[in-house]
Image (cartoon, rainbow, N blue to C red):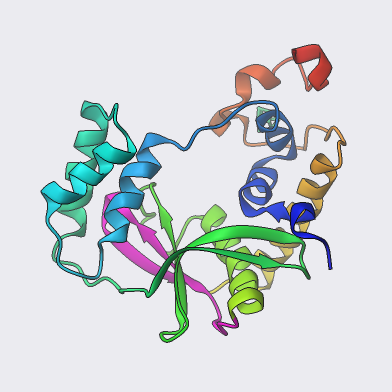
């Protein structure tokens, strides 16, 4: 079994799934948690029990002291979307999990062995049906990790789309697990220092690294 520091983060696996070059370029920058996620995460902590929206907004301000109108508007949207819906109350939040078998690790947003079940929190809008492809990959990774670390034997997990007020269950299939294995292998190569090739037909129009990637990947030493 690999040591903890040798396990690949699930965030790196999803970046490699999008495009291995994106993971390579992401690795060369500092990344802060997006404010959008911080707002949704704070709302999510309170779902499944009565809560006071004003008190939750105070918590958001404690986490994001420079929250602006954009975050305030998102918070109001989340409040509107989430109220009056059925939410599951999980016993634990932010639980570190890993799979030595797959060589991955992450922090699952919610878990409860008694349900049994787990959930991930997303700050994106829900698709019309089901869950986004990248969330299927996340759920495939976390299902393996919560089984191995927490002994929670479930076929899949819940995805909370907070801005839409939507909770959906995802059961990964063989196709998702194949995508997961390919993404883990690609992420391991990048973590080992290999510069990935530009894949065929990459999703460049949706890529936040488009500008840096345009001339082709460069070695870290050239970027410093
Ligand atoms: S711009 Fe395209 S090739 Fe470059 S990292 Fe993004 S998806 Fe990959």
Name the residue located 13 percent from the left edge and 66 percent from the top edge. Answer: 84
Residue at 31% across, 43% down: 39
Quarter residue 106 falls in: bottom right
Residue range corresponding to the magenta coloring: 151-170
Residue at image position (86%, 42%) is: 192
155 inside magenta stretch: yes
Q: Position of residue 70 (x, y in %)?
A: 25, 29
**Coordinates of residue 137 in the picture (x, y in percent):** 60, 59
Above or below residue 155? Residue 121 is: above
Which residue is more in the foreground, 204 or 29? 29
| Rendered view: 160 above or below 217 | below
Q: Is residue 199 left or right of residue 61?
A: right
Asked if residue 184 can be seen in this view, the reply is yes
Looking at the rendered image, the quarter that the N terminus falls into is bottom right
Which quadrant does ligand 1 occupy?
Answer: top right
Decide if residue 129 is in sight here: no
> Measuring 77% from the left and 61% from the top, which residue is drawn there?
103
- Seen in the picture, residue 124 relative to 100 is either above or below; the reply is above
Q: Position of residue 62 (x, y in %)?
A: 28, 39
Q: Nearer the viewer, residue 136 or 222?
A: 222
Horizontal arrangement in the rendering, residue 4 relative to residue 130 (left or right) = right
- Is residue 187 shown left or right of residue 94? right
195 magenta-colored: no
């Amino acid at each position: 079994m690999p040591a903890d520091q040798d396990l690949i983060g699930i965030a790196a696996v999803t970046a490699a799934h999008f495009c291995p070059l994106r993971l390579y370029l992401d690795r060369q920058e500092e990344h802060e948690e997006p404010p959008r996620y911080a707002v949704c995460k704070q709302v999510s902590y309170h779902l499944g029990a009565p809560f006071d929206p004003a008190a939750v907004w105070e918590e958001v301000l404690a986490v994001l002291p420079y929250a602006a109108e954009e975050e305030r508007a998102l918070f109001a949207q989340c409040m509107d979307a989430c109220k009056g819906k059925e939410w599951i109350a999980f016993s634990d939040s932010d639980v570190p999990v890993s799979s030595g078998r797959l060589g991955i690790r992450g922090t699952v947003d919610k878990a409860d062995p008694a349900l049994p079940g787990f959930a991930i929190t997303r700050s994106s809008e829900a698709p019309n049906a089901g869950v986004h492809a990248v969330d299927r990959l996340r759920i495939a990774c976390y299902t393996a990790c919560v089984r191995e670390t927490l002994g929670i034997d479930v076929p899949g997990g819940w995805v909370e789309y907070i801005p839409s007020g939507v909770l959906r269950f995802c059961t990964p299939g063989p196709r998702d697990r194949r995508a997961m294995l390919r993404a883990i292998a690609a992420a391991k190569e990048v973590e080992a220092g290999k510069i990935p090739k530009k894949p065929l037909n990459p999703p460049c129009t949706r890529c936040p690294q488009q500008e840096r990637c345009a001339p082709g990947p460069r070695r870290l030493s050239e970027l410093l």
